Image (cartoon, grey):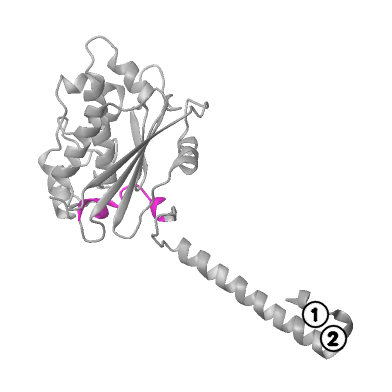
């Protein structure tokens, strides 16, 4: 603004007025930018704001289950080169969606390979950073965004007797430790890789649906209090061992189903 004036021709009063006006313009711009940032931080859903997709696990359970706010899902799959999930397990997950979710406009899938981040075993903080760098889909008006990362290394808490196959860590995000799934499925007598993938995918998505007592209220008590957020029915998909190496002894060639208690919880929260 001052570029258009010569300081030599402006008297003291004019200069004070100019600075005052410049200050008001600056203050207005600062206020406008601040308000815009506040509005974004408050959860505006325009397809580019990540904040609505950075909430607590289970907090979007009703959003997934019902069509009251979102009638379609954008499912973004990011995998490390060489660790792409099987077509069978993804198709099985889509069938799982269709059985449980009211999404009349359906699900669109985008898949993308990335180079190895090169820092495994992964902490959950590192998984979050990978999402921050690579996720491109966020909630947009009536479209709910879902993100899955298929990792090339294991979870940092794994030890010689227990490993983690996957974990849900935000309201619309989960990670599958694909390298670990491959190793487990290659063991003698283990379930096939597609079956093991399917069970873990559906189990982790079950947590995003609020199971168990994780955003979808229990209609009857079936919480495994020792392991938390899991079903106490050993044949249920949401039994705690499904997301660990012990899942290999549970599958027996078949993928577990949600039991009646879990299904009742989902229906009560807007599901089919």
Q: Is residue 55 magenta?
A: yes
Residue wearing tag 2: 10
Please say whether residue 243 is visible from this viewpoint: yes
Query: Within the image, what quadrant is residue 152 found in?
Result: top left
Identify the residue at horizontal 21%, vertical 39% (top origin): 94
Front one among 7 and 258: 7
Please say whether residue 163 is visible from this viewpoint: no
**Cβ–Cβ below 8 Å for labels 2 and 1?**
yes
Query: Within the image, what quadrant is residue 211 found in?
Result: top left
Q: Residue furthest top?
A: 188
Quadrant of the frame with the N terminus: bottom right
Residue 220 in picture, x, y percent from top left: 14, 48
Which stretch is magenta?
52-66
Answer few, some or many: residues within 10 Å of disc 1's Cα (few below 14, many 20 plus, some between 14 and 19).
Answer: few
Identify the residue at horizontal 39%, vertical 16% (top origin): 160
Which mark is drawn over residue 159? none
- Measured in 3D between alpha carbons, the distance from the residue under mark 2 to the one under mark 1, in whole angstroms, is 8 Å
Can you say whether 216 is above or below 223 in the image? below
Which mark is drawn over residue 5? 1
Answer few, some or many: residues within 10 Å of disc 2's Cα (few below 14, many 20 plus, some between 14 and 19).
Answer: few
Can you say whether 108 is above or below 36 in the image? above
Residue 68 in picture, x, y percent from top left: 21, 61
Q: Residue furthest bottom?
A: 13
Q: Secondary structure at mark 2?
A: loop
Can you say whether 207 is above or below 11 in the image? above
Q: Is residue 135 magenta?
A: no
């Amino acid at each position: 603004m001052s570029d258009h004036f010569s300081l030599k021709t402006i008297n003291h009063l004019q200069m004070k007025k100019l600075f005052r006006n410049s200050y008001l313009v600056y203050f207005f711009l600062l206020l406008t930018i601040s308000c815009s940032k506040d509005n974004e931080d408050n959860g505006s859903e325009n397809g580019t704001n990540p904040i609505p997709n950075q909430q607590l696990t289970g907090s979007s359970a009703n959003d997934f289950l019902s069509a009251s706010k979102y009638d379609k899902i954008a499912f973004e799959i990011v995998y490390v080169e060489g660790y792409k999930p099987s077509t069978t397990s993804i198709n099985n997950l889509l069938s799982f969606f269709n059985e449980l979710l009211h999404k009349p406009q359906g699900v669109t899938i985008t898949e993308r390979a990335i180079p190895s981040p090169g820092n495994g075993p992964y902490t959950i903080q590192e998984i979050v950073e990978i999402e921050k760098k690579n996720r491109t889909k966020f909630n947009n008006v009536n479209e709910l965004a879902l993100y899955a990362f298929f990792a090339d290394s294991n979870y940092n808490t794994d030890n010689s007797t227990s490993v983690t196959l996957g974990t849900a860590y935000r309201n619309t995000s989960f990670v599958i430790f694909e390298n670990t799934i491959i190793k487990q499925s290659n063991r003698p007598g283990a379930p096939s890789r597609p079956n093991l993938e399917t069970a873990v995918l559906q189990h982790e998505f079950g947590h995003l649906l609020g199971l168990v007592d994780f955003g979808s209220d229990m209609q009857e008590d079936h919480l495994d209090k020792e392991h938390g957020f899991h079903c106490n029915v050993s044949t249920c998909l949401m039994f705690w061992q499904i997301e660990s190496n012990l899942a290999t002894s549970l599958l027996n060639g078949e993928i577990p189903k949600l039991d009646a208690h879990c299904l009742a919880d989902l229906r009560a929260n807007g599901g089919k």
